[in-house]
Image (cartoon, helix red, strand yellow):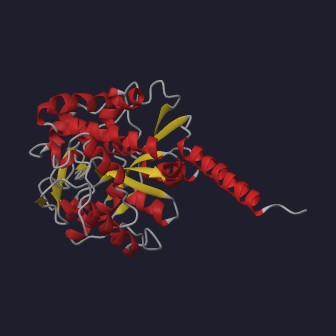
Amino acid sequence: MHFPLSNLRRWGAALAAVIGLAAAAAVQAAPDAIRIGVATAGGGDPVTWGGSPGGVARSQQWLEEEFRNSGTRVEWFFFKGAGPAVNEALSNKQIDFAYQGDLPSLVGRANGLDTRLLLASGTRNNLYVVVPPTSDIRSIQDLKGRKVSIFRGTNGHLVAINVLAAHGLAERDLKGVNLDTGSAQAALVSGGVDAAFGGSEWFKVRDQGLARVVYSTQGQDPAFTRQAALLVRGEFERAHPAETQRVVDVFVRAARWASDEKNREALFALWARSGTPVASFRAEFEGQPLAERNSPLLDEFLRARYQAVVDDALKLRLIRRPVSVDDWFEPRYLDAALKKQGLQGYWSAYDAKGRAVAGGAAVAQR
């Protein structure tokens, strides 16, 4: 059968149009749900967490407000197993976004997880070593040969290793015990371990007279701090760029509110809904500007810290292959949010050593 060339061209154009419309529909169709995984057990009702601007968005229900009447519901999932458990949920496509620390997110990427890092959401988090009040442990060196809790696979794990190394010790010099936060607290109080590494959650135990802090990274080299960020599954981001932008917009709004010194006490009160007392956040953030800790910028400091985590994780065989940081960070959504909210230049960017430079860009130009 003979078809005129003009007809073939028309059919070809029509077919191309149909394919284009189908592709556009695949991108633009709103998801039924936006599922966010948080790498902590959290606390409160509804469950929330502290120490991150993300906790502000959660407790204030700003994401729910953003997607109200859109046909898309917002679902939050909190993981007692922290970063490693979040990686499993990402792998199984059970969540779309993840609030996660640096090491576990990089381990996930090294193991083939398709994610994009969208913005910082709680940086320069401190690490502490706590012991029972009557312990004879007074320093990092005194941990040698002792039974010490370290939550392996989390962003505190690698910092703990680096802190030990700075004091002439390695993880193998300890009798390490892998415990999550709640289990570590119970073990320390009951005498099941001699010491524990952890974060600001230990101030509550200290203030109850059940622990003593013998080491803190506060005021030290920022290389000894932990970073956390918001990630998105690559498949979700490609299919739903508009929804991804709206999520980032809300997290940036929360970061702006959480960076305002006028909101310091109100911020700590919001975070305290997680079950961690206001006094603990006061202690954790003492002498530190909120804007420095709650900035969403993907600046050179964040890039350098994540690259350092890659290098250390390779050296310690926590990951088996290199991970590219450069093509993992995706600043376009953050850039758009900063511009939309008039926040270009609001936060200072920091260089690789953690020193302030001129702000204004979501990621330093290379």
The residue lying toward the viewer, choosing from 18 and 115, is: 18
The residue lying toward the viewer, choosing from 306 and 64, is: 64
Of the 4 image quadrants, the one containing the N terminus is bottom right
How many numbered marks appear?
0
Image coordinates of residue 208 in percent, x first then y, are: 22, 33
The residue lying toward the viewer, choosing from 3 and 248, is: 3
Indicate whether 365 appears above or below 102.
Answer: below
Residue farthest along the right direction in this orientation:
1
**Quadrant housing residue 332:** bottom left
Indicate whether 83 appears above or below 168.
Answer: above
The residue lying toward the viewer, choosing from 231 and 179, is: 231
Q: Residue at x 76, y 63 (%)?
A: 5
Q: Residue at x 59, y 46 (%)?
A: 26
Evaluate whether residue 172 shows in this view.
Answer: no
Indicate whether 197 appears above or below 207.
Answer: below
Of the 4 image quadrants, the one containing the C terminus is bottom left
Image coordinates of residue 291 in percent, x first then y, are: 16, 45
Image coordinates of residue 306 in percent, x first then y, are: 32, 63
Q: Residue at x 39, y 44 (%)?
A: 245
Q: Residue at x 40, y 73 (%)?
A: 314
Image coordinates of residue 255 in percent, x first then y, are: 25, 40
Evaluate whether residue 274 shows in this view.
Answer: yes
